[in-house]
Amino acid sequence: MIQTISLLPGVTLRCCRDKRFKQGCLSFQLVRPMCREEAAYNALLPAVLLRGTRQHPDLRAITEHLDTLYGASVSALVRRVGDYQTTGLYCSFMDDRFALPGERVMAPVVAFLEELLLDVPVKNGGFLPGFVESEKKNLISTIESERNDKRVYAMSRLLKILCREDSFGLPRLGEPQEVEAITPQSLWAHHQKILRTSAIEIFYVGSAGCETVADLLRPLLSRLERDYIPLPPQTDLRSSRGDEVERMDVAQGKLCMGFVTPITNRTPEFASMQVLNALFGAGMTSKLFVNVREKQSLCYAIGSAYYGAKGVMTVSAGIDFDKEEQTRREILRQLDACRDGQITPQELQAAQQAIVSSLRATHDSPGAVEGYYATAALSGLSLTVEDYEKSVLAVTVEDAVAVARQLELRATYFLRGGSQ
């Protein structure tokens, strides 16, 4: 059961009281509308915050302090949830029940979270230049490493085509040139602005009651100067059409196809669409894997993914360059098979069990619980894990056929070998 408390206008605390774990977790997320101007700033900010505070001025001092808190950890947290980007910090720590008598862990962890967010060393009206420049290099390296993974690169190119008019096509971490342009002063100004104006989502998993957690957070929140700007609601995708071929020095082609549907995680057919995705291409029992890869050997790897917050389904396949048209036709043929009801009871059951297995893993750790419910709250998904499981198991072949017929191919991207 998730208990929700509004601590201030735009500041929400969600608590999952669970005594199964020896570890607890607390996430602090500033929620922003996803936009090109802010993406790189939001991706860079938490890494800079973690470099040092006035009381603990460097990484060594921070590490030594966390060691005194039974090995607690704090990490950067940057997510894209539909129309939103979040930036913040994630704390993992020993539950107070397992500390030595008379000692507490969560209270000093929350105090340290406050320190990281608000007791920041400042020079010439900005963050310390050494911190910013070092983390800019790290972030640019991360962005470029994703580009070097051609599967990831190809999918990002597809989303840019499909979502040309929608923020969902923007890269979560920004572009290298956008990171490079950030200065210590501009990042500091951004930090002050988003603390003041953003929706703040705080999520706790552990044995403490929600009011106890709220009391620990109030000193931090009392230091914030708030001028909250309400978030716009999540929207359906504004999709674009496109078909692009790019040449690059690669040994294997990457074919990506983008489909749209009016079904999102805010509509009643959401569970049916998730089951269809598993039937069609998500997993080793799916039609794409069994038929396109195993039986026809048209690809080295293939799979589909469904982004419920925006109503997008994608297919990605690694293929030989001369297999593009044949693979594309076969992918569409397998989707037509779903639309025509060519789904066996065994296929349906395998798809349902794959989703249920994944859902049940949500209860395996505090981080998994936080990841599911914190993103669900932002994306508009109102189902608990248990209700979600029931909905999945209730899906029929007819339900899967109905949602398959609502998918429309809108964009394709093919990365092939050779020069431009």
Image (cartoon, rainbow, N blue to C red):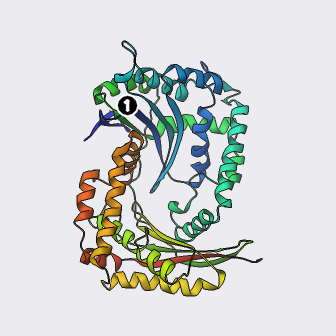
- Residue 93 visible in the shown view: yes
Which one is nearer the viewer's eye here, 109 or 188?
109
Q: Could you tell me which residue is drawn at 51 percent across and 78 percent down? A: 293
36 lies left or right of 342: right
Residue 13 is situated, as x and y percent measured from the top left of the image, at 35, 36
Which one is nearer the viewer's eye here, 18 or 266?
18
269 vs 50: above or below? below
Residue 19 is situated, as x and y percent measured from the top left of the image, at 29, 32
219 lies left or right of 207: right
Residue ranking furthest to the front:
295
Residue ranking furthest to the top:
102
314 vs 37: above or below? below
**Res. 285 image quadrant:** bottom left
Q: Give the class, few, some or many, for how many residues have Cα within 10 Å of label 1's Cα (few <14, many ≥20).
A: some
Q: Amino acid at mark 1?
A: Lys
**Mark 1, secondary structure of its residue:** loop
404 lies left or right of 123: left
41 vs 50: above or below? below
**Res. 11 image quadrant:** top left
Report the quarter where the N terminus lies.
Answer: top left
Residue assigned mark 1:
22
Q: Could you tell me which residue is drawn at 54 percent across and 27 percent down? A: 116
Which one is nearer the viewer's eye here, 58 or 264?
58
- Residue 265 visible in the shown view: no
Residue 349 is situated, as x and y percent measured from the top left of the image, at 29, 69
Which one is nearer the viewer's eye here, 115 or 357?
357
Report the quarter where the C terminus lies.
Answer: bottom right
Q: How many marks?
A: 1
Residue 264 is situated, as x and y percent measured from the top left of the image, at 35, 64
276 vs 19: above or below? below
Q: Could you tell me which residue is drawn at 44 percent across and 32 percent down? A: 226
